[in-house]
Amino acid sequence: MLIKYWPKTTKIPFMRYRFFGVAMSIIMIVGSLTLLATRGLNMGVDFAGGSVVELQETVTVTVPQVRSKITGALTVNSATGSDGARLVVIRFGDLDETLLGAEFQALPEEEKAERASAASNVYVVEELKRVFNLADTDILRNDSVGPKVSGELFIEGMLALGVATLMMMFYIAFRYSWSYAFAGIASLVHDGIGTMGLFSLLQLEFNLTTIAALLTILGYSINDSVVVFDRVREVRRKYKQMPSVEIIDIATNETLSRTFLTMGTTLVAVLCITLFGGPVLRDMSIAMLWGIFIGTYSSIFFASAIIIWLGTDIRKPGVTDDTPGFEGVS
């Protein structure tokens, strides 16, 4: 329905504000890198190692009761499940070995390091069962990841991001030219660093679900950029003597309705996940909300500004133009 009322043609001079847009992007990137260097990321159990246990909140099983009755360095908070039920969420790393029994303390140091996470998990779960008279079915979630596995997961997650980015760069270079590929990858790095900076600023949990969100953001962003690139190529073929600034303004305006309608419908879906998806999906949906915004922003201002500096020509040396004889207008 919205497209019916969208103007048929727009003439917004986006590239007039490209220096301001790039300056804002540089400030965001520098700020994000500073936050990552000083505050770091709030690594979830997937990457930091440790355990997460979730219980149904009842009259007797409450956050204050768990904090007071279970010994150990536990982080206990309340949350709301996807069905609206109240939960008690317990997070912890390796506990003091004096709590893990004489058998654990007698192990060699290397074996202690390997088994500490599992032993801590067993201790907390057994204590919860004993103190609150719980059955196995009352433990709604019990995830435990050792330090070795968590390190491998982090490396593999970052590797997935790197491989995805490289493959996109090679595709764009093959489909358009290296100037477009560089602009597209710069836009992806911009979006990735900006999203990780948000996670550092708000100390949202960074886990495997976040990696999935980042990959989704990169896919959304590069798709948006490629739509603009494709229209830039079409306009460049039509108006060969036109300055790059005007070409990109025309291309951006011609794709503007598609950009905002896609962004709007995606935002509605992600906002529903944020509001009603529960705590498990909250951090991922926040990342996607932010990523959709900066992905659209970077496609219009950041990537386009780089193309202006590098050139909009998509013809490779030795390859004739595929619209011969059409010189366009100046």
Image (cartoon, grey):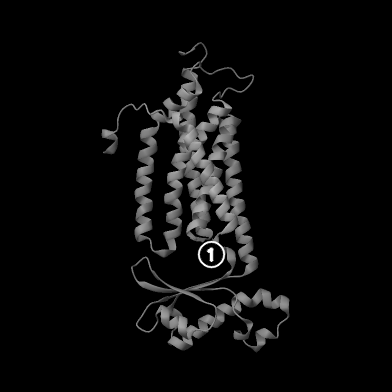
Q: In this view, does 122 lie above or below 299?
A: below
Residue 41 pos. (x, y %):
55, 59
Query: Number of marks in the image?
Result: 1
Query: Which residue occupies 26% across, 34% down?
Result: 5
Say whether residue 225 is visible: no
Q: In this view, does 244 lie above or below 131?
A: above
Query: Which residue occupies 46% across, 29% down?
Result: 15
Residue 130 pos. (x, y %):
48, 88
Question: Is 68 displayed left or right of 318 in the figure?
Answer: left
Query: Which residue occupies 62% across, 52% down?
Result: 159
* In-front residue for pair 280/32: 32
Q: Is residue 244 above or below residue 214?
A: above
Question: Is 88 displayed left or right of 3 in the figure?
Answer: right
Question: Is 51 displayed left or right of 11 in the figure?
Answer: right
Residue 61 pos. (x, y %):
40, 82
Secondary structure at numbered mark 1:
loop
Say whether residue 286 is visible: yes
Residue that numbered label 1 is attached to: 44
Q: In which quarter of the image is the N terminus?
A: top left
Q: What residue type is labelled 1?
A: Gly
- Mark 1 crowdedness (10 Å alpha carbons): few <14, some 14-19, many ≥20: many
Q: In this view, does 37 lie above or below 329?
A: below
Query: Which residue occupies 60% across, 79% down?
Result: 119
Residue 26 pos. (x, y %):
54, 42
